[in-house]
Amino acid sequence: MPRLSFQTPKYRKHRASGQAIVELSGHRHYLGPHGTKASKLEYDRLVSEWLASGRRAIGADNEAASITVSELILAYWKFVAQHYVKNGKPSTEQSSIRWALQPFKDLYGRTLAAEFGPLALKAVRLNYMQAGLSRRSINQNTRRLVRVFR
């Protein structure tokens, strides 16, 4: 197990660009021109947010972690409605995706999308099996379900 460091990340200069940077949880954050007051204020803000979040990644990662499965399905469905169209009409893949996502939404709609893992996927697959689907249909629906997370 690695030794935990209790030091605050350093305010550094990125030599190639001349920008001030700080690395938090393995992510490099650019703060603006090195040595300016604005970059130092941005450094203070980012480090304090990082410390307040328990030294976890800050920014878009935290927003993504709070999305529920239902919200994820809604965002994916907007993509599906635009992408799976043939001659101006919805393709048959749209209805297949809708059918594949229904048990997923029923079982896990209120849970966080970040908490959906391999065991939950097995539970949805079991639901497909109980519906009497063939192996091929189960595998197709599982692939459709996995595409939601890409």
Image (tube, helix red, strand yellow):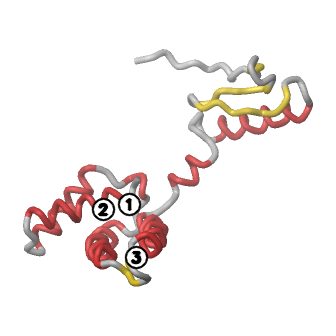
Residue in the image at 77% along x and 24% along y: 17
Q: Earlier in the sequence, mark 3 or mark 2?
A: 3
**Tag 1 secondary structure:** helix
Q: Amino acid at mark 1?
A: Val
| x and y percentages locating residue 131 in the rendered image | 12, 75
Q: Are marks 3 and 1 in contact (CB under 8 Å)?
A: no
Q: Does residue 132 appear to the left or right of 61 in the view shown?
A: left
Q: Which residue is mark 3?
A: 85
Residue in the image at 38% along x and 53% along y: 115
Q: Are marks 2 and 1 in contact (CB under 8 Å)?
A: yes
Measure the C-alpha gap from mark 3 to mark 1. 18 Å
Residue 25, compared with residue 108, is above or below; it is above
Q: Amino acid at mark 2?
A: Leu
Residue in the image at 31% along x and 56% along y: 146
- Tell me, for residue 148, which label it has, or none: 1
| x and y percentages locating residue 45 in the rendered image | 77, 38
| x and y percentages locating residue 26 in the rendered image | 56, 28
**Tag 3 secondary structure:** strand
